[in-house]
Amino acid sequence: MERPTVARMSELVPQELRVLVAVAHEGSFTAAGARLGLTQSAVSHAVRSCERKLGAVLFDRGRHGARPTPAGERAAAQARRILGLLDTLPGEARGAAAGQASGTLRIAAFRSAAVHLLPPALERLTVRHPLLTPEVRIVPDVGRGTAGEVADGRADLAIATLDGSTPPPGGLVTAVLLEEPYALAHPAGAADPRALPLVDWTENCSSYTRRWWSEQDWIPRATVDAGDDSVVLSMVARGLGMAIMPGLALLGAPAAVAVTDLGPRRPSRKVGYATAPELAGTLGVRALIRELRSAAESVLDGSIAV
């Protein structure tokens, strides 16, 4: 494919970016056209235009539909971020004049953060910025997790677990909100909690606990993969086993669940936010970060220490 010139790359227009994103999401030109109100031929023309301007094949076409190539995956992620920034432009302009954030704010969070940090933060945010509309998606904290949603342009801000040993995807801006310790959750009154079967869930196998976990010869192989931490707590409350869980997941645990300290060398994990550099200074993201910091302080002042 002909190498693009700077002039040609600058000719990319928002409608072409929207087509690129729609095809990547739908997996076919026809479905993308239906989503955007365009004909299949118009979508095909826009994709060919993007490929010509970028100098790369963006989709593999075939009977399966249209699958993004590695170049297409990257281009779609960047297109989502560009379109997201364009979407903030009207609200930023109005907000600069009125001192109020407005528009849509897309948030990705894992379950326990969504339960304990988001509600108080969003309550204050919407009171102070009534023209701002938060949209929340719950994303499992595995793989690229919630930060990956921001890197790929599907969210403006993520509440994420932050691993200091690896950089966040996509050059994101991150900061820690709180550090939560892990503890042993077990049925109240259990004579020997450590002898019980282990109930676990996929999100719990992380770099924060892996080394500590490997050093503990008393932890058995998990007999139940419960899907998420709320199911784990329910099973522990029913006497079906014990679990090793982070502090946020243990807030509001049923009375039938007892929580025991794992000692001075217990593992912990850092919970923070991640946002794109181009969004970090926008009114909505800045306002949400302020409220998340306040919510994290309230949690730390309460019962997160176990």
Image (tube, rainbow, N blue to C red):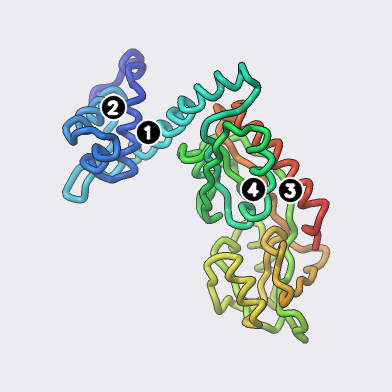
Could you tell which of marks 3 and 2 lies nearer the N-terminus? 2
Three-letter code for the amino acid on which mark 1 is drawn: Ala
In whole angstroms, how far apart are the C-alphas of marks 3 and 2?
Answer: 43 Å
- Tag on residue 178? 3
Residue wearing tag 2: 50
Could you tell which of marks 2 and 1 lies nearer the N-terminus? 2
Judged by depth in the image, the label closer to the viewer, 1 or 4, is 4
Front residue of this view, candidates 136 and 246? 136
In whole angstroms, how far apart are the C-alphas of marks 1 and 3?
Answer: 34 Å
Q: Residue at x 25, y 40 (%)?
A: 34
Could you tell which of marks 1 and 4 lies nearer the N-terminus? 1
Q: Secondary structure at mark 2?
A: helix
Q: Position of residue 63 (x, y in %)?
A: 16, 49
Could you tell which of marks 4 and 3 lies nearer the N-terminus? 4
Residues at discs 1 and 4 in contact (Cβ within 8 Å): no
Residue wearing tag 1: 75
Q: Quadrant of the N terminus?
A: top left
Could you tell which of marks 1 and 3 lies nearer the N-terminus? 1
In whole angstroms, how far apart are the C-alphas of marks 2 and 1?
Answer: 10 Å
Three-letter code for the amino acid on which mark 2 is drawn: Cys
Q: Quadrant of the C terminus?
A: bottom right
Crowding near pointer 1: few (<14 within 10 Å), some, many (20+)?
A: many
Q: Residue at x 61, y 16 (%)?
A: 97
Three-letter code for the amino acid on which mark 3 is drawn: Leu
Residue wearing tag 4: 118
Residues at discs 2 and 1 in contact (Cβ within 8 Å): yes
Relative side of 248 to 201, left or right: right
Relative side of 120 to 298, left or right: left
| Image quadrant assignment for residue 256 | bottom right
Crowding near pointer 3: few (<14 within 10 Å), some, many (20+)?
A: some
In whole angstroms, how far apart are the C-alphas of marks 4 and 3?
Answer: 14 Å
